[in-house]
Amino acid sequence: MSIQPVDSIVAHQEGTVCTVGMFDGVHRGHQLILQRLQEVAAERGLKPVVVTFDRHPRVVLGHTDNGFRLLTTNEERAWLFAQHGMSHIGDVETVTFTPEVAQQSACEFYKTALKGGLNVKVLLVGYDNMFGNKQRNDFDRLLSMPDVEVIRTEALVCDGVEISSTQIRNRLMAGDIEGANAMLGYRYAVEGNVVHGKGIGRTIEFPTANVELNDPMKAMPKEGVYAVRVRVGETPIDQYGIANWGGRPTLGDERSVLEVHVFGCKEDLYGKTIKVAFDYRIRDISEFGSLDELSRQIGADRERAMKLFGI
């Protein structure tokens, strides 16, 4: 995804069908929009284009005091867009989101970036999506403009709830990783580099990789122990394991740390980048009276994870 100011977007002579949004998570609801976008483009003989932003508006406007975090990095969004058909140059236009862009109303953004820049003929939006400054809300005026057709997609429901990035964040914070994954349409994952820890895991026969997360703005699930799948570097092979995300009260450490025990791994992981995908929540963080008790519990966690994975 190339990142550029609004006024540098190059117009498409043939015209475009366009959708606008942050697309954080590129979840199943977003995937429906991307599918419909490409269908409408094929029907009308137009080019399908996604307009997204380099930073979440809440981050730019400073609305992150309540612990707001993102479901996907820019790189992850780009990869997910490509997985759902938006892989060619010009398919995704990433706008530099600035306080000045935040001040634009929907009609102003349409005139500068969409009509003036992309020659939009059809605007496709999600069931509840409205872009533009909320204090200067003129989104409804777009519906009556003669030179653009606005199409809304239907809501996608999962377990009786309309899928949204907010609902997915709520499930992550509640530890409902299976519910979050069902809405995403894939396993929620984080990436980081393996760094040296205290080495206590090896002394109790459960060596762990301490993961230093790449992006502090990336959302994490509720603290606890999870059954996970791990990928090392560029290797496209999943390895099974368990992860402890949170403090380590048995060791007197209250810092939130991601530790991963990869089943049967003999590889030296120090300094390598790994991707940790969360499948199942096993239990809450607990304090044990001794390292022997901790070792027995990790063994039980491993057995439960193996049963959940069917291995």
Image: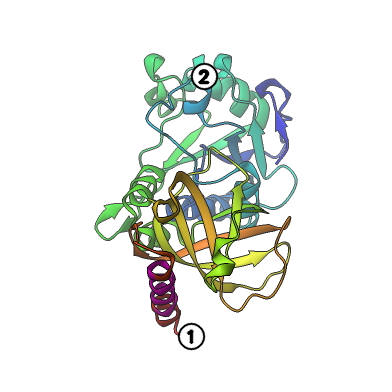
Name the amino acid type tagged 1.
Ile
Residue 176 is situated, as x and y percent measured from the top left of the image, at 33, 57
Q: Nearer the viewer, mark 2 or mark 1?
A: 1
Specify whether residue 200 is painted magenta: no
Q: Residue at x 60, y 79 (%)?
A: 264
| Magenta segment | 293-303
Name the residue beneath numbered marker 2: 102
Name the amino acid type tagged 2.
Ala
Residue 7 is situated, as x and y percent measured from the top left of the image, at 69, 20
Q: Residue at x 66, y 73 (%)?
A: 237
* Front residue of 194 and 114: 194
* Front residue of 304 and 5: 304
Mark closer to the chain start, 2 or 1: 2
Q: CA distance from mark 2 to mark 1?
A: 50 Å
Marks 2 and 1 in Cβ contact (< 8 Å): no
The answer, for residue 224, to whether it is visible in the render is: yes
- What is the number of the mark on residue 311? 1
Q: Residues within 10 Å of mark 1 (few under 14, many from 20)?
A: few
Q: Residue at x 53, y 17 (%)?
A: 108
Residue 240 is situated, as x and y percent measured from the top left of the image, at 54, 74
Q: Dot 1 lies on which element? A: loop
Tag count: 2
- What is the number of the mark on residue 166? none
Q: Quadrant of the N terminus?
A: top right
